[in-house]
Image (cartoon, rainbow, N blue to C red):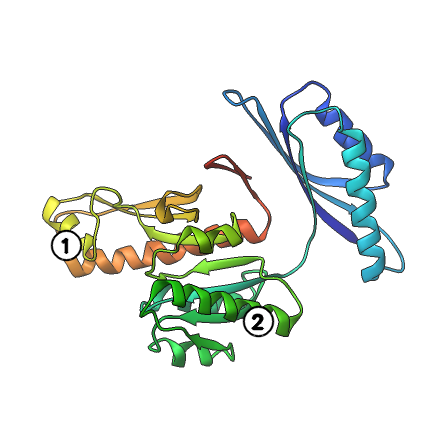
C-alpha cells in the first residue's frame, strides 16, 4: 500500500476542498484521514490529508514517480488559487540529529523513545559542546561528537561540518535538528540553513525569569505553575513558532530543587510530544505561528 501525507496551504477560497479531493480521487487515491482549518484573520487555509493507493509491485522508483505525478496534478488543479504551498510527503522514518550540552533528561528520554520505536526516527548522531553525555549516548550505539565552544563562530562551523559528514555517510539529508537542552544561542548564519527544521525546548518562565538560574528566581517569586515550551528556532532563539506547551501546578511546598525536577519532567515530555508531531508531519508554519493537527 502506497501512502502519502499531503500538506496544503493557500489563501482561503471557494472550491479549494473540492478541487483537492477531486484531483486525489482522479489519481486513484483514497483519503483515509483529513484535517482542515481556516484562519479567519489571515484568510489562510490549511489542510492535512493521509491518502493511500494499492500498487503492485511497489518499489522506490514507482514511489518517486507517483510522488512527482501527484504533486504535478495538484499544482495544475490548484494553479488559480493564490499563496499556494503543497507538500507531498512519503511516509518514512525521519533522519534527526540531536544537540546537547550537559543535561541528560531530554536527551536520554529521546534516545529511549527512538530505541523503543515510539518515535519514527533514525538518530544519525549526537553533537555536544561537552564530553559528559558520551557514555549515555554510546550505550545506544549512536555516534557522539564533541565540538568544544571556545569561539562561537568556529563552534558553529564545526557543528555544520559534522552534520554534513553525517549526511554524506548515510547518504541522506537531516530532516530535523533537535536541541535537547543544547545551551547555546545559535546565530542567524547557522539557523538560516535549517528554516523550521530546528526544534528547541525550554522552561516557560521566559521572559519573566531570564538567566542561568530561573528556578531560584521563580521560587523567590512564589510561582504556582511550572511549564515548558517546544518551538522551532529562528534568528531569535526562543521566539520561534511555538509547537506545543504544557504546564504543571505547584505550591508552597516545592523547594527550588523539587521545582527543578518537576521542570525537567515536563520539559522532556513536551519535547517528545512536539517531536512526534513534527515527525508525523502534523505541524504547519505560517509567519511566526503554527497550526497543529
Dot 1 lies on which element?
A: helix
Give the image location of residue 119, x and y in percent: 55, 60
CB atoms of marks 1 and 2 within 8 Å? no
**Does residue 12 sit above or below 125 in this rendering?**
above
Side (left or right) of 179 relative to 18: left
- On screen, residue 24 versus residue 140, left or right, reads right
The answer for how far apart the CA atoms under marks 1 and 2 are is 39 Å
* Position in image of residue 39 (x %, y %): 53, 25
Q: Which mark is residue 237?
A: none
Q: Secondary structure at mark 2?
A: helix
Task: In the rendered view, tell whether residue 230 sits above or below residue 288.
Answer: below
Name the residue at 52% across, 23% down. 42
Q: Quadrant of the C terminus?
A: top right
Q: Residue at x 45, y 53 (%)?
A: 189
Give the image location of residue 72, x and y in percent: 80, 40
Q: Quadrant of residue 88?
A: top right
Would residue 235 be found to the left or right of residue 88 on screen? left
Q: Is residue 197 visible?
A: no
- Residue at mark 2: 166
Q: Which is nearer the eye, 137 or 120?
A: 137
The residue to which callout 1 is attached is 216
- Number of numbered callouts drawn: 2
Q: Residue at x 14, y 54 (%)?
A: 216
Q: Position of residue 110 (x, y in %)?
A: 46, 64
Amino acid at each position: 500500500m502506497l501512502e502519502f501525507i499531503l500538506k496544503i496551504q493557500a489563501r482561503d477560497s471557494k472550491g479549494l476542498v473540492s478541487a483537492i479531493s477531486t484531483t486525489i480521487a482522479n489519481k486513484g487515491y483514497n483519503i483515509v484521514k483529513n484535517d482542515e482549518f481556516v484562519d479567519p484573520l489571515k484568510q489562510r487555509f490549511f489542510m492535512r490529508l493521509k491518502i493511500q493507493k494499492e500498487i503492485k509491485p511497489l518499489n522506490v522508483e514507482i514511489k518517486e514517480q507517483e510522488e512527482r505525478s501527484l504533486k504535478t496534478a495538484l499544482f495544475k488543479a490548484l494553479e488559480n488559487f493564490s499563496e499556494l504551498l503543497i507538500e507531498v510527503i512519503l511516509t518514512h522514518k525521519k533522519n534527526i540529529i540531536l544537540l546537547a550540552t550537559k543535561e541528560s533528561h531530554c536527551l536520554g528520554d529521546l534516545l529511549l523513545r527512538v530505541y523503543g520505536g515510539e518515535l519514527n526516527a533514525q538518530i544519525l548522531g549526537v553533537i555536544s559542546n561537552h564530553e559528559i553525555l558520551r557514555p549515555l549516548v554510546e550505550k545506544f550505539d549512536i555516534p557522539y561528537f564533541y565540538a568544544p565552544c571556545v569561539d562561537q563562530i568556529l563552534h558553529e562551523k564545526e557543528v555544520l561540518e559534522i552534520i554534513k559528514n553525517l549526511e554524506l555517510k548515510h547518504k541522506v539529508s537531516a530532516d530535523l535538528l533537535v536541541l535537547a537542552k543544547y545551551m547555546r544561542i545559535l546565530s542567524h548564519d547557522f539557523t538560516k540553513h535549517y528554516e523550521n527544521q530546528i526544534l528547541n525546548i525550554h522552561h516557560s518562565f521566559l521572559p519573566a525569569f531570564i538567566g542561568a538560574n530561573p528556578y531560584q528566581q521563580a521560587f523567590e517569586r512564589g510561582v504556582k505553575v511550572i511549564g515548558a515550551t517546544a518551538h522551532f528556532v529562528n534568528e531569535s532563539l526562543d521566539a520561534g513558532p511555538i509547537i506545543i506547551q504544557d504546564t504543571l501546578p505547584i505550591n508552597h511546598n516545592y523547594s527550588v530543587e523539587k521545582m527543578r525536577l518537576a521542570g525537567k519532567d515536563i520539559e522532556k515530555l513536551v519535547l517528545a510530544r512536539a517531536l512526534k508531531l513534527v515527525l508525523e508531519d502534523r505541524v504547519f508554519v505560517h509567519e511566526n505561528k503554527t497550526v497543529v493537527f
